[in-house]
């Protein structure tokens, strides 16, 4: 019983370690590819009967899983931040130019796109 639980915990730990390594090197495709295996390993771990008293080895495995999961959560949050920044850059680049507006000083061209327009005009 404890052997199955220990094996399930070790499988999940190995997958979390691999996903964390992929996230640290910003290899999002590799991290995403591990999601089905991670979900299956988590489901397998949850299905295992829990012993009434955990052996010291199981306690150490639980601590390791806790640490890997905490690191995974932090790395996933960082990956989401990076992806959000990239999407914002792409969205801004693909946004239609803003039309010039009239203000108190006359015609005003939005400065955000002025540099890009000037650069493309010279090209």
Image: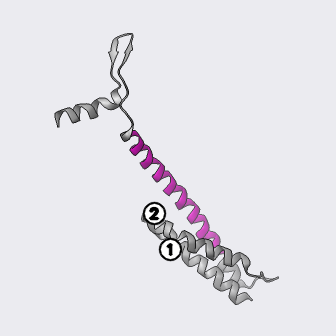
Q: Quadrant of residue 122?
A: top left
Real-space CA distance between mark 2 and mark 1, rounded to the nearest whole angstrom = 12 Å
Q: Residue placed at 35% from the left, 11% from the top?
A: 105
Q: Position of residue 111 (x, y in %)?
A: 33, 27
Residue lying at the far left in this picture: please name it. 122
Q: Which label sits on residue 18?
A: 1
Dot 2 falls on a residue whose secondary structure is helix
* Residue ID for mark 2: 28
Dot 1 falls on a residue whose secondary structure is helix
Q: Position of residue 90 (x, y in %)?
A: 39, 45
Q: Quadrant of the N terminus?
A: bottom right
- In the image: residue 32, left or right of residue 64: left
Q: Residue placed at 65% from the left, 73% from the top?
A: 42
Visible residue check, residue 59: yes
Q: Residue placed at 58% from the left, 70% from the top?
A: 68
Labels 2 & 1 near each other (Cβ < 8 A): no
């Amino acid at each position: 019983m404890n052997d199955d639980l220990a094996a399930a915990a070790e499988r999940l730990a190995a997958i979390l370690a691999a996903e964390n390594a992929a996230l640290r090197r910003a290899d999002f495709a590799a991290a995403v590819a591990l999601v089905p295996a991670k979900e299956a390993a988590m489901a397998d771990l949850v299905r295992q009967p829990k012993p009434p008293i955990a052996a010291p080895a199981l306690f150490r495995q639980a601590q390791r899983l806790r640490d890997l999961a905490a690191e995974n959560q932090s790395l996933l949050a960082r990956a989401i931040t990076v992806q959000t920044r990239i999407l914002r850059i792409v969205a801004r680049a693909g946004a239609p130019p803003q039309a010039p507006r009239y203000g108190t000083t006359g015609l005003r061209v939005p400065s955000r796109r002025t540099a890009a327009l000037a650069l493309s005009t010279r090209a």
